[in-house]
Image (cartoon, rainbow, N blue to C red):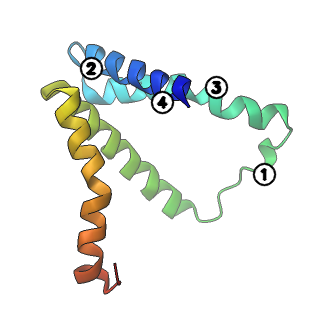
Amino acid sequence: MLMAVGAFALMDALMKLLAGSYAPMQVSFLRGITSLPFLLLPVVLRGRLARLKPVNIPLHLFRGVLAVVMLGSFIYAVRESSLTVTYSVFMFAPLLVAAIAGPMLGERV
């Protein structure tokens, strides 16, 4: 767990460094392309690549677009603000979702 937290801290520091010179979407692309081998290697080694068939392609594409927008927005926020402020807002998101779940979805929190 300590190594994972350290890796994420290093990754975010590098993102802040790169965001000063590159556009947020370019940094998002670099982050995605460098993580792809770590995601695909275990799948390929276990011989389960054929099992990665999407069931509902439009929903997968919508989720992908939302993920790209979210990561680009996060990198933009990291570039324009400090890491502490950005992470404070990022960690507040679950509380915000819980707070609006009642009025918007009629759920009991």
Mark 2–mark 1 distance (CA, rounded to whole Å): 36 Å
Task: Please tell me which of labels 1 and 4 falls first in the chain.
Answer: 4
- Which numbered disc, 2 or 3, marks the residue closer to the eye? 2
Q: Are marks 2 and 1 in contact (CB under 8 Å)?
A: no
Which image quadrant for residue 43? top right
- Which numbered disc, 2 or 1, marks the residue closer to the eye? 2
Which amino acid lies under the numbered mark 1 shown in the image of this protein?
Answer: Arg
The residue tagged 1 is 51
Mark 1–mark 3 distance (CA, rounded to whole Å): 17 Å
Q: Which mark is residue 87?
A: none
Percent coordinates x, y for residue 2 in the rendering: 52, 26
The residue tagged 2 is 16
The residue tagged 3 is 37
Which amino acid lies under the numbered mark 4 shown in the image of this protein?
Answer: Gly
Task: Please tell me which of labels 3 and 4 falls first in the chain.
Answer: 4
Residue at 71% over, 54% down: 53
Q: Are marks 3 and 4 in contact (CB under 8 Å)?
A: no
Task: Please tell me which of labels 2 and 4 falls first in the chain.
Answer: 2
Which amino acid lies under the numbered mark 3 shown in the image of this protein?
Answer: Pro
Q: Residues within 10 Å of mark 2 (few under 14, many from 20)?
A: many
Q: Which mark is residue 32?
A: 4
